[in-house]
Amino acid sequence: MAAVLWLLPLFSPHSVLFPAGAAFADILVYKGRFTVYHTLKFFTSRAFSGFAYPPGAAILYEAFYTTSDPVQTYLLLAALTTLIALAATWLFLRRNGITHLVPVLLLSSFPLVILIQRANIELVLWIVIATGILAYRRGLAIPAAVLFGLAASVKLYPIFLIGLFLRRKQDLRAFAVGLITAIVSLIAATTYAGPTFLLAARGFTTGLGSFQDHYIDKVSKVEIAFDHSLFSPLKYAAFLNHSSPSPWTHTYYLIAGSFALLLFLRVRSFPFLNRLVFLLVAMVSLPPVSFTYTLVHLHLPILLLCGNLATLRSSTPKTAIASLALLLFVTLPLVSLNVIAPGFPAGPIQSFALVALLVLSTLQPWPSKESVAQAGL
């Protein structure tokens, strides 16, 4: 029933659940500009929307635009990804005997629905990052590092995830591989974009600067409701005062960066789930602009926490209750408050839940299946 309620608004262009704009707009916004890809006009022409992503993203857009219908290609990829994710989720829940948690997962599915409604390339990042996380969980550190590095060349912030390799000295090689992969991918994608590396590098830098001017230094009533970055409360305050939040930007970077670094120094020695939740939440909340669809990256941690809860259900009631509270904390940011009160500044409210989750992940190590087995629980 919850899934139906989320999906129905896809057929209503005036739904309050989604930000204003045509459905599937994000995959089409650069179609005109890519008619002059690999030329100087790609970076300088004002006839099209300015390209606001790193060079790795340009390769993805080019791939979609070489198909006969980019929207249909995107929807086919989204449908295939969703079906595979649903099948894998059901098998995981059934194997752990927790199929009764399906309603919780359905209620937290709004970010995926809005992702598909906007047709944003975050879908591809979700596939790559989730595959990397599963690879890491299976002990395949180097392939995971490569995937995280490739993802960082598309939207930069997945570079947070190479922090997973800073727990042990044995993982430093994977950390280096992830960092080198990101750098090499950015250089290669910039060179490929042409016409020369320096012109392309300057063009992509200008595009990212324009993105900051539009989404960080200025505040839109519609966009702020879907922006859960930790900077969004300041942007909302600026909006109420009819001013720009730009004077606070550098201070935000300093305070938020120092805060995250201090927390990471504590959590980096904690078990896998602590580190994973911390890094993913940092990834989707620390950039000064982050929209609802980026929260799809928390779907996998929710699933893994469900499995953790199943493992701990036979242990002490206190541990089980703590695990359930943790699950709810992760789920909370995923349910858009726009559903309850259209026009309400859900994004800034969600940012406080994400801060709570960052702190919660660093308070104490969460029991894992291995630790529970060793304790004889």
Image (cartoon, grey):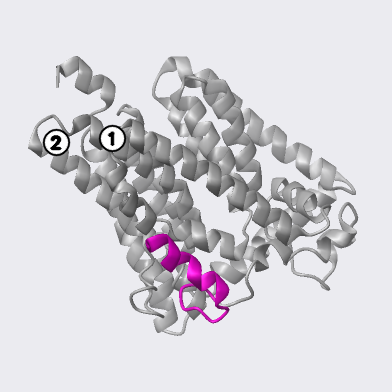
Question: Can you give x and y, in whole percent of width and height, for residue 271 in the image?
Answer: 31, 28
Q: Amino acid at mark 1?
A: Gly
Residue 34 numbered mark, or none: none
Question: Can you give x and y, in whole percent of width and height, for residue 18 in the image?
Answer: 50, 72
Residue behind mark 1:
97
Q: Nearer the viewer, residue 34 or 322?
A: 322
Image quadrant where one finds the N terminus: bottom left
Q: Earlier in the sequence, mark 1 or mark 2?
A: 1
Q: Is residue 191 above or below residue 8?
A: above
* Residue at the (27%, 20%) spot, across then down: 370
Q: Is residue 158 magenta?
A: no
Say left or right for 310 vs 246: left
Describe the element under mark 2 as helix, strand or loop: helix
Q: Which residues are magenta?
A: 1-19
Give neighbour class at mark 1: few <14, some 14-19, many 20+ (Cα, 10 Å). few
Q: Is residue 11 magenta?
A: yes
Question: Can you give x and y, in whole percent of width and height, for residue 195 in the image?
Answer: 90, 49
Q: Nearer the viewer, residue 247 or 305?
A: 305
Residue behind mark 2:
319
